[in-house]
Image: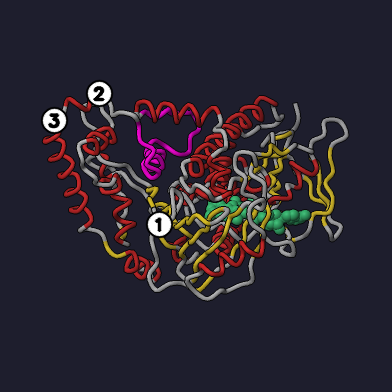
């Protein structure tokens, strides 16, 4: 048996590195570990990653970060979901909300009743039964309640924040919790001659830093997992072919939308992320179908304000390291894998990677079964998100556009096909372990693409059409009633930023 784990070295000071530092310093405080972040300000961070999912609120709570402080210090706005424009076809759009639709009855999920009314000529969109969608569409803010009376009250929000301000906030918190910070470039990584674990890194100023457990947050370079330990990369380009992005921030609009917008383009899609002080814009595209200059021009032409910085050009490959935990190195963030930011999943993957690590945290010897468990769970989580992202492309009807024809023709993975079969045949959801996106999210996509099942559940026929009409009308009225308690998103932001 080796000595207990006494020191953790986190390589990288981007969002992943500082999230890891604050979280581990808090959760493992009782172990009195030495935690060091080594980063190179000369190399810098990727500088994108501004949209989140509601789970980020749990992260704030886990590290005792006040939500109002985050909103104020990171120039944040509220996000109730994502508006997808042009994905089915030009001119069409739909919303993926952070909330549920309607109220289930007699054990039958709400969407079957909605489908039944549709079959009887009622064209009310699904979003009319979702509070988060309505808040987004009307530019309102309302905090979720703890114990809602029924599903109509179940919704949540995420935030759009300035990633560098968020990293700075985390850094302050980490340092206050005893984390040490070294700003230097790592030039060499040394491994144990016997078992191959990482022992020390050598810095450009000649210093050496030793550690028992290493967290690789070095970004796409994957300094430890990839370069030092040679863990291969599992390439998912055949399923998610977009491989480049260009990002250009621009001046902020007067009114901030409480949602992200993802707009389909000729060979990919554009993001619009409203922050208080600027708008984050980017174009994610597939280099087989458009060149860099044309992709940049398309983004510049769509900006709703004045550019604030030179274009940030980024290359990536969808996929992940074959193992997220290898020997005494755990990879987080871009060092461990990447899926395009269509559903803003990278930051939440950093968070879940950290949460998964705590129950498996090695006391002394690194039992290979810990890493095997961690790796199995991490791969499943990535695969589930991959399948959900593929669904965003497969449902398009942009026939005759080469990129969209290509992505529509990509054969679904077995997992996605299983989900599609159950949905199309019976309006059923197949639930899988480690699915980040639950039924309502899948439903928003299916309905958004008008990919509706062959039939609604037979049990929905227990309720006569006239009763159903009344009941669904009452649900819409209940949502309207709740919305009367909401305030304009803009007023909320002004209030929070003024510290009220
Ligand atoms: P980085 O920010 O790249 O940090 C790497 C760190 O390693 C830096 O501190 C660097 O200095 C350090 N480093 C590297 N080499 C060395 C060395 N030799 N010595 C010392 N230090 C070193 N995520 C979301 O959740 N939402 C989004 O909306 C979103 N949008 C994105 C858009 C694009 C186009 C891309 C590519 C990513 C997006 N992401 C998004 C992902 C998000 O940007 C990352 O998950 C997040 O920023 C974490 O990055 P990181 O910390 O892993 O890497």
Front-most of 439 and 277? Answer: 439
- Mark toward the viewer: 1 or 3: 1
Q: Which residues are magenta?
A: 428-453
Kind of element beneath mark 3: loop
Query: Could one spot residue 17 in this view of the protein?
Result: no
Quarter holding the C terminus is: bottom left
The front one of 14 and 411 is 411
The answer to whether residue 121 is above or below residue 267 is: above
Whichever of callouts 2 and 3 sits on the residue coming sooner in the sequence is 2
Residue sitting at x 47%, y 45%:
396
Which residue is denoted by mark 3 in the rendering?
464
Above or below — where is 293 with respect to 422?
Answer: below
Image quadrant holding the N terminus, namely: top right
Image position, residue 320 (x, y; %) = 66, 40
Give the image location of residue 63, x and y in percent: 50, 50
Q: Secondary structure at mark 2?
A: helix
Which is nearer the N-term, disc 1 or disc 3? 1
Seen at 52% across and 58% down, the residue is: 270
Q: Is residue 442 magenta?
A: yes
Q: Is residue 305 left or right of residue 145?
A: right
Q: Please give left or right for residue 314 compared with residue 448 in the image.
A: right
Residue pointed to by mark 1 = 91
Residue 64, horizontal then vertical, whole percent? 47, 52
Q: CA distance from mark 1 to mark 3?
A: 35 Å
Most extreme residue toward the bottom is: 306
Camera-side residue of 310 and 209:
310
Q: CA distance from mark 2 to mark 3?
A: 12 Å
Residue indicated by mark 2: 458
Decide whether residue 386 is among the magenta residues. no
Residue 283 image-quadrant placement: bottom right
């Amino acid at each position: 048996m080796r000595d207990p784990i006494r020191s953790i070295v986190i390589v990288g000071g981007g969002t992943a590195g500082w999230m890891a530092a604050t979280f581990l310093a808090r959760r493992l405080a009782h172990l009195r570990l030495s935690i060091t972040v080594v980063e190179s300000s000369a190399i810098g961070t990727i500088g994108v990653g501004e949209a989140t999912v509601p789970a980020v609120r749990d992260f704030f709570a886990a590290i005792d970060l006040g939500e109002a402080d985050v909103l104020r210090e990171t120039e944040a706005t509220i996000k109730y979901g994502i508006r997808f424009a042009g994905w089915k076809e030009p001119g069409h759009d739909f919303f993926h909300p952070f909330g549920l639709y309607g109220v289930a009855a007699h054990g039958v999920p709400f969407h079957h009743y909605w489908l039944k009314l549709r079959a009887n000529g009622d064209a009310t969109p699904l979003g009319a039964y979702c509070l988060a969608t309505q808040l987004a569409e009307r530019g309102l803010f309302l905090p979720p309640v703890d114990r809602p009376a029924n599903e109509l009250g179940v919704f949540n929000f995420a935030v759009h924040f300035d990633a560098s301000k968020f990293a700075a906030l985390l850094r302050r918190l980490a340092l206050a919790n005893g984390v040490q910070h070294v700003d230097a470039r790592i030039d060499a990584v040394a491994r144990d001659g016997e078992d191959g674990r990482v022992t020390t890194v050598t810095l450009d100023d000649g210093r050496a830093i030793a550690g028992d457990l290493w967290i690789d947050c070095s970004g796409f370079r994957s300094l430890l997992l990839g370069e030092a330990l040679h863990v291969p990369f599992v390439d998912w380009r055949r399923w998610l072919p977009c491989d480049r992005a260009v990002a250009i921030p621009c001046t902020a609009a007067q009114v901030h939308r409480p949602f992200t917008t993802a707009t389909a383009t000729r060979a990919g899609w554009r993001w619009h992320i409203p922050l208080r002080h600027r708008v984050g814009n980017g174009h994610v595209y597939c280099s087989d179908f458009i060149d860099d200059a044309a992709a940049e021009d398309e983004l510049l032409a769509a900006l709703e304000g004045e550019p604030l910085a030179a274009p940030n050009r980024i290359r990536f490959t969808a996929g992940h390291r074959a193992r997220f935990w290898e020997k005494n190195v755990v990879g987080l963030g871009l060092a461990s894998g990447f899926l395009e930011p269509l559903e803003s999943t990278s930051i939440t993957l950093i968070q879940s990677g950290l949460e998964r690590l705590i129950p498996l945290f090695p006391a002394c010897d690194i039992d290979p079964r810990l890493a095997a468990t961690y790796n199995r769970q991490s791969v499943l989580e990535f695969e589930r998100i991959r399948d959900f992202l593929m669904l965003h492309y497969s449902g398009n009807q942009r026939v005759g556009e080469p990129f969209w024809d290509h992505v529509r023709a990509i054969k679904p993975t077995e997992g996605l096909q299983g989900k599609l079969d159950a949905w199309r045949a019976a309006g059923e959801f197949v639930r899988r372990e480690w699915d980040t996106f639950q039924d309502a999210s899948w439903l928003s996509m299916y309905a958004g693409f008008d990919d509706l099942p062959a039939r609604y559940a037979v049990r929905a026929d227990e309720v006569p059409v006239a009763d159903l009409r009344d009941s669904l009308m009452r649900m819409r009225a209940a949502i309207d009633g709740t919305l009367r308690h909401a305030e304009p998103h803009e007023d909320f932001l002004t209030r929070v930023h003024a510290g009220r």
